[in-house]
Image (cartoon, coloured by chain):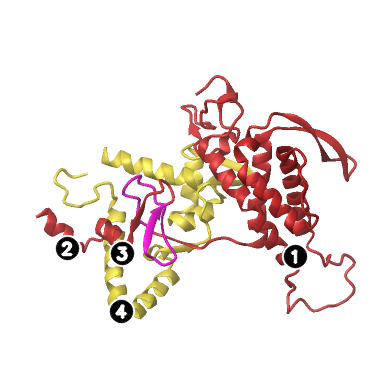
Chain colours: A yellow, B red
Amino acid sequence: MKKNDPWPWPADTQLERARRIAASYRTALLSVAPDLCAQLDAKAVELGQGWVKPLETDIADLDEMLSAEQIAGILFVEPRTVRMWGYRGHIERLDDDGKPRYRLRDVLDYQARTRLERTA
Amino acid sequence: MSDNPNHECRRGRRCKSRVKTAAGTFHGALIDRPDALCRLCEDSAFEAIRELGEDYAGLCCYRFEDRSQSQGPKVGGTNPNPSIPVALGVDALMARIDDETLRWALRITRGDPVPDHHVLRVRACVATLGANLGTLVDLPKRRLPTLLPHPDGGDFLGLEEMDGVDAVLRLASFHHRAQTLMGEVETITWQRDPCPHCGRKALAASKDQEYVSCKGCGITWDSAHFAQLYNILDFERKVARA
């Protein structure tokens, strides 16, 4: 973190800063041209950049046990990153019939902890 | 971490307020009373039990819904293992909800009469349980008759030791199973930003997009206030700061 960083959210990584700026542009576009915004959203999702818009999901319970792929889809990280967090013991890996499952709350807690460490 | 495992939440590593030790293992939250649930797990289970009457009524309707595929595969002969035209999973769950709610309601009311019709009976039992959840969770351990799986297949009537916490967890699990069976899951909109309070990326917008709340810490903002916290084009805040 730079000493006199004017960015209001100092814990943000460079990627998060870029995404937050993109989200601001999207919000502005949505308010003046919703159709155009929807077109761009669809194109971005088609190109594998689903992070650009809020995610609609039926997963409402943070204690739900999910696969690495499901968590990756929600948090927009690589599934192998989730598996690596489990392998390194940052999040608990709970096997369900031989399939590794992770609790969404653990992943969110781990991300929040690392975010807090960046500001410390 | 407590040396006595009885002072951990009975849900163990599946506890909602579980803690991680230095060794990396997860344990249930510490509680004052032995063999009980932590506050979060208890509240969640109580909430689920209160929904059981509605779940049962929903399962009744769901049982008769037509879920057959209008365009199945082309029939090329007689299927040696034809599918059963009855929703057995739904029937089994309904029977278990009926049995268990009746069993625990009778233990609380000490044998008060209940309606004969199954829907009314479940509703009455859930109402009794809902009004006496504190009593239910504190029931002492007893050996109760229950159907147990027979090693050679089928079930047999045996005795199982259960206390109030077992009852609460079992009844709550029926709610979750009913929701899963009926596919009644709420669709929510997840924001990509971290919560300004707890830092978890668990922000969800309400259906009408009027409010944003954090599923991690439970704080709620109205959308205008949330935009002030998050939008870079927040001119008002810049002006206020200047």
Pointer 4 local density, CA inside 10 Å: few below 14, some 14–19, many at least 20 = few
Magenta range is: B192-214
Question: Is residue B213 rendered magenta in the image?
Answer: yes
Chain on which label 4 sits: A
**Pointer 2 and pointer 1 on the same chain:** yes
Q: Name the residue under label 4.
A: A33
Pointer 3 local density, CA inside 10 Å: few below 14, some 14–19, many at least 20 = many
- The circle drawn on residue B53 is none
Q: Who's the residue at 77% across and 41% down the image?
A: B111
Left or right of B126 in this view: B112: right
Q: Mark 2 vs mark 1: which is more N-terminal?
A: 1
**Pointer 2 and pointer 4 on the same chain:** no
Q: Which residue lies furthest to the top in this view?
A: B3
Mark 2–mark 1 Cα distance, whole angstroms, equals 56 Å
Asked which secondary structure carries label 2, the reply is helix
Which of the two marks, 2 or 1, is nearer to us in this view?
A: 1
**Pointer 3 and pointer 2 on the same chain:** no
Pointer 1 local density, CA inside 10 Å: few below 14, some 14–19, many at least 20 = some
Instruction: Give the number of marks.
Output: 4
Left or right of B132 in this view: B240: left
- Report whether residue A18 is seen: no
Chain on which label 1 sits: B
Asked which secondary structure carries label 1, the reply is helix
Rendered image quadrant of residue B224: bottom left
Three-letter code, disc 4 = Ala
Which of the two marks, 4 or 3, is nearer to us in this view?
A: 4
Asked which secondary structure carries label 3, the reply is helix
